[in-house]
Amino acid sequence: MGSISIDRDALLGAIKAVASVVKSRNTIPILGNLLIEASDGTLRIIATDLDLICEAQCAAEGDIATTVPAETFRVAVEGMRAGRIAVTDDGKKLVMSHGRARRQMPVLPVTDFPRLVLDEDTHTFDIAASALNRLLASVAHVQSSEETTRLYLCGILLCAREGALVAVASNGVSLAKATLGGAEKARDMPDAIIATKTIRLILSHIGSGSEIVTMQIGANKMAAQIGSIRLVAKRIDGTFPPFERFIPDDNANVLAVQAGELMHAGDAISGMVAAEGKAALRMLRMDLAPDADLNLVARDNLGAEAIEPIEASYAGDPMNIGVNSRLMRETIRMFAESSALRVCPRGPAAPITFRSDAEPDLVGVIQALQV
C-alpha cells in the first residue's frame, strides 16, 4: 500500500530493465508480477523467475509496497504522457494518474513475492564493464541449449587460473575461451557456472554506462551490481569438464589466414548452396596443401556445389577436412575481421584450434569432420 510521485520516463526505464526476467506464461501468478517498493526517495522494481532476481532503481517521492502484473504495468506506463505521474495502491488495486489520464490494475500481496538471498560467504571483486563484456560476449555463442541432458554446459564457466579471470563455454562439439590477465582480486573465487539467461541479462546491462561491475560469487548463488541494476542468480549445479585438456597445443600444421577473408568466403558459399531453402548444407570442406591457397568447398544434399579460393598460407601435411559451417563462422566472429588467424588442424575428426597473435586472450576450438 502507499503512494508515490515519479517521473514517467524514469519509471519506464526501470520497468524495461527488469521485464525480460518475467516469463510470458506462468503457472504461479505472482511470478508474472513486478515487486514495487519505494522508501527514502528510492523506488525499487524487482522481477524474478525463482532462479534469477533483477532489481532496478530510480528516484521517487513517497512510500509504496505492492506487486502488479508486469506486462500490464509496462503497457500502462508506456501509454502515459511524459512528466510526473502519481501511483497509488489501496491493497486491492493500483491506480496511476497524470492529469485526467488514469490507469488501474489489480495487485497481489507483497508477502507472496519470492525473494532470492545471496549466500553469506561470497568472493567479491570489481571488474571493468568493458573487460567483463569481452570475456562473456566472446564465448557466449558456444553455450549449449541441452538443458535435459547436460545442464552444466548451459552457461559460461567463470573461474580464476594463475592470476587470470577465465570464461569458458562449450556445447560438446566446440569450445571458446577468453582470458583476462591481471585479475588478482578474483584469484580465490570458486569456479562458477553462470546460466545462459543470467549471462544474457548481464550483457544487456553492461552497456548502460557503468564503468565498474561488482561481482559476488558464492557457493550456490552469484550477484552482479551494474550501475543501478542488481542481479542475484542461482549458479548451475554440476562440474564443468576440465576444459584445459580439450584445447590442444599448436602443432606443425598451421594455416595463416585473415579472419575477414575466411568469414566472407564461408558466408558466400554457404548462402549459395542453401539458397533454395530445401537444401541442407552438411559441412564445408577445407582443402589444405603446402604453398597453395586455401580452397573452401560447400556442397548440399541436392548436388549444388561452390568452391571459393582464399589467399592464405599453409605449412604442414596436406589434408582435406570438413568443418561445421555455423560453428566455424561463429568461432571466427570471436576475432576482429582484420586479425590474422592461426588455424591449426590435426586431421579428420580431430580438434581444430583458432588463435590470433593480435588477440592472444581468445581461443576457439571446433571438431573437424570426416570428409
Image (cartoon, helix red, strand yellow):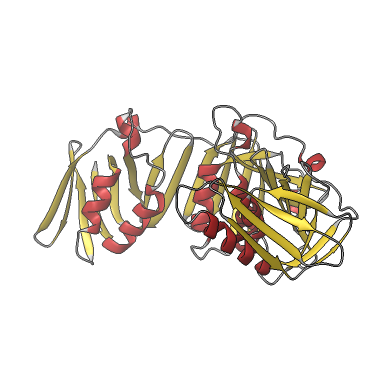
Q: Is residue 284 left or right of residue 161?
A: left
Q: How many marks?
A: 0
Q: Is 134 situated left or right of 234 in this image?
A: right
Along the line of sight, the residue nearer the viewer: 182 or 296: 296
Q: Quadrant of residue 77?
A: bottom left
Q: Is residue 138 above or below residue 222?
A: below
Q: Can residue 226 be seen at all in this image of the molecule?
A: no
The reply to whether residue 190 is in sight is: yes
Tell me: 103 left or right of 189: left
On the image, the x and y values in percent for residue 359 come to 75, 64
Q: Is residue 303 above or below residue 271?
A: above
| x and y percentages locating residue 164 in the rendered image | 78, 53
Between 363 and 29, the one nearer to me in the picture: 363
| Residue at 45%, 47% in the rendered image | 278
Residue drawn where x is 65% and y is 29% of the image: 238
Q: Is residue 67 left or right of residue 144?
A: left
Question: Residue 102 appears at what percent x and percent y?
Answer: 12, 54
Which residue corresponds to the image point at 47% horizontal and 53% vertical from the top-left? 229
